[in-house]
Image: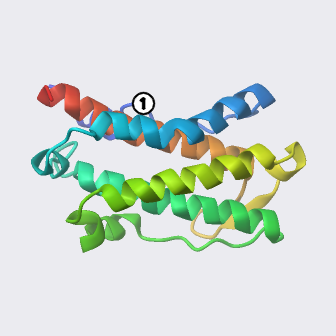
């Protein structure tokens, strides 16, 4: 049986890179561009029963994961925009676990979340492609963690986030033989 830590962090926990090269930055931007289509391909034939299956014991269902991705990535896009238009703005944290329990995350079709992800990622990709190296140095302040994040690190975190939740669903699909 696969251990709980692997099920929680199938690609490992996020490790903040010490330096992000321009080449790595381009790779990260490609992940943002391609993620919605990659996710759609993974889940396009899932039934409601499969969407309501948790990826691990006491974990979120696939439906909640997809809705969480839409919520989280919308927040990230807004954080990028805040950092680009304000001087080190303080961002608003949110209770992601509680958001996942709300009815729009727990029970409705994933179609609205997938449409959101597609639109969010299209806009995010366009924004990212337009940024200069200097703009990637812009920051926002996370009050719960009491630290500033520059946009390069934030992008690296969200690429990890895409791959992290994709692996949750992919591993469940393999485990269940779907």
| Rendered location of residue 14, percent (x, y) | 52, 39
- In the picture shown, does residue 16 fall above or below 58? above
Picture quarter containing residue 107? bottom left
Mark 1 Cα within 10 Å, few/some/many (few <14, many 20+)? some
Picture quarter containing residue 96? bottom left
| Rendered location of residue 161, percent (x, y) | 48, 44
From where the camera sits, is residue 147 visible? no
| Rendered location of residue 21, percent (x, y) | 78, 29
**Residue under the image location 53 percent in, 56 percent down:** 119
Classify residue 56 as left or right of residue 18: left
- In the picture shown, does residue 40 fall above or below 126? above
**Residue under the image location 72 percent in, 34 percent down:** 25
| Rendered location of residue 147, percent (x, y) | 69, 60
Classify residue 60 as left or right of residue 138: left
**Residue under the image location 21 percent in, 38 percent down:** 45
**Residue under the image location 47 percent in, 71 percent down:** 94
Which residue was labeled with disc 1? Answer: 11
- In the picture shown, does residue 36 fall above or below 64? above
Q: Quadrant of the C terminus?
A: top left
- Secondary structure of the residue carrying tag 1 is loop
- Residue in the foreground of this view, choosing between 67 and 152: 67
- Residue in the foreground of this view, choosing between 101 and 18: 101
């Amino acid at each position: 049986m696969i251990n709980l830590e692997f099920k929680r962090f199938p690609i490992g926990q996020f490790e903040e890179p010490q330096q992000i090269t321009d080449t790595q930055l381009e790779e990260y931007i490609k992940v943002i561009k391609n993620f919605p289509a990659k996710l759609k391909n993974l889940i396009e034939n899932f039934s409601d029963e499969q969407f309501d299956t948790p990826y691990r014991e006491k974990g979120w269902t696939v439906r909640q994961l997809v809705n969480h991705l839409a919520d989280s990535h919308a927040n990230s896009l807004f954080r990028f925009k805040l950092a680009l238009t304000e001087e080190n703005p303080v961002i608003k944290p949110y209770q992601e676990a509680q958001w996942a329990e709300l009815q729009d995350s727990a029970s409705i079709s994933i179609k609205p979340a997938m449409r959101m992800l597609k639109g969010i990622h299209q806009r995010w990709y366009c924004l990212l492609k337009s940024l200069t190296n200097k703009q990637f140095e812009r920051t926002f302040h996370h009050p719960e963690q009491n630290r500033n994040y520059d946009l390069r690190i934030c992008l690296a975190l969200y690429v990890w986030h895409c791959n992290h939740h994709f692996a949750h669903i992919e591993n469940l699909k393999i485990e269940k033989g779907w």
